[in-house]
């Protein structure tokens, strides 16, 4: 039986700067038959179009990108420090070359409508894509801070409704 409890996204008490920037997260998308996961540490949570949302940024060369592009939903799983090695693995190796579930020992779980996430997470956000757009060179105003991060591989921004938030007691 799942140890998760569903809460309203607005009830999340953790500091989003810590959660995303320090704890990191796994973005996971696909189906029970085929899914992939990768580590992210940039992005945000907030309100857009009157809904609680995530802002997620995925470069097009990621294998995970194929899954987030081809599925309406993805999850963001946040973990305690014990899973740091798993997150390092998922953030440095590609699902094109490795079975990340097998290599990390993480346990996949699925929502009722089949969105993959991980049982070991302390917090899971189930995200439904709302608006996607590639960042682009013309829109950069602070070139010194931004351009050093790119070699013609601008992230795609995903603004997604948080349809479900799951926490462990
Ligand atoms: C701490 C950390 C944060 C990362 N954040 C992002 C991110 O926000 N967006 C992104 O596209 N890649 C990010 N990455 C890189 C991907 O996780 C990495 O390229 C991964 O191997 C992609 O796996 P995949 O090819 O299986 O999708 C991050 C990596 C690490 C270690």
Image (cartoon, helix red, strand yellow):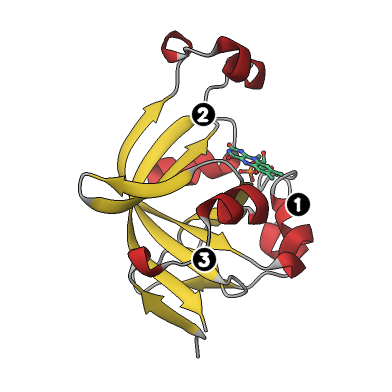
Q: Which residue is mark 2?
A: 155
Determine if residue 36 is in view: no
**Dots 1, 3 in contact, CB < 8 A:** no
The answer to whether mark 1 is within 8 Å of ligand 1 is yes
In this picture, is 165 found above or below 90?
below
Residue at image location 45% in from the left, 16% down from the top? 136
Q: Residues within 10 Å of mark 2 (few under 14, many from 20)?
A: some
SS under mark 3: strand
State how far apart marks 2 and 1 are (Cα). Answer: 20 Å
Q: Which residue is mark 1?
A: 88
Residue 145 placed where, x, y %?
Answer: 61, 18
Q: Residues within 10 Å of mark 1 (few under 14, many from 20)?
A: some
SS under mark 2: loop
The answer to whether mark 2 is within 8 Å of ligand 1 is yes
SS under mark 1: helix
**Dots 2, 3 in contact, CB < 8 A:** no
Q: Residues within 10 Å of mark 3 (few under 14, many from 20)?
A: many
């Amino acid at each position: 039986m799942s140890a998760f409890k569903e809460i309203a996204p607005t009830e999340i008490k953790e500091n989003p700067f810590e959660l995303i920037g320090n704890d990191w997260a796994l973005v996971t998308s696909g189906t029970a038959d085929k899914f992939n996961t990768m580590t992210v540490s940039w992005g945000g949570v907030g309100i857009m179009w009157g809904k609680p949302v995530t802002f997620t940024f995925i470069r097009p060369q990621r294998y995970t990108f194929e899954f987030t592009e081809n599925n309406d939903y993805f999850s963001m799983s946040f973990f305690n420090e014990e899973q740091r090695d798993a997150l390092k693995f998922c953030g440095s190796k590609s699902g094109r070359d490795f079975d990340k579930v097998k290599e990390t020992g993480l346990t996949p779980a699925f929502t009722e409508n089949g969105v993959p996430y991980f049982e070991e997470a302390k917090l899971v956000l189930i995200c439904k894509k709302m608006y996607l757009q590639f960042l682009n060179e013309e829109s950069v105003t602070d070139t010194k801070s931004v351009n050093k991060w790119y070699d013609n591989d601008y992230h795609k921004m995903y603004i997604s409704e948080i349809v479900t938030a799951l926490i462990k007691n």
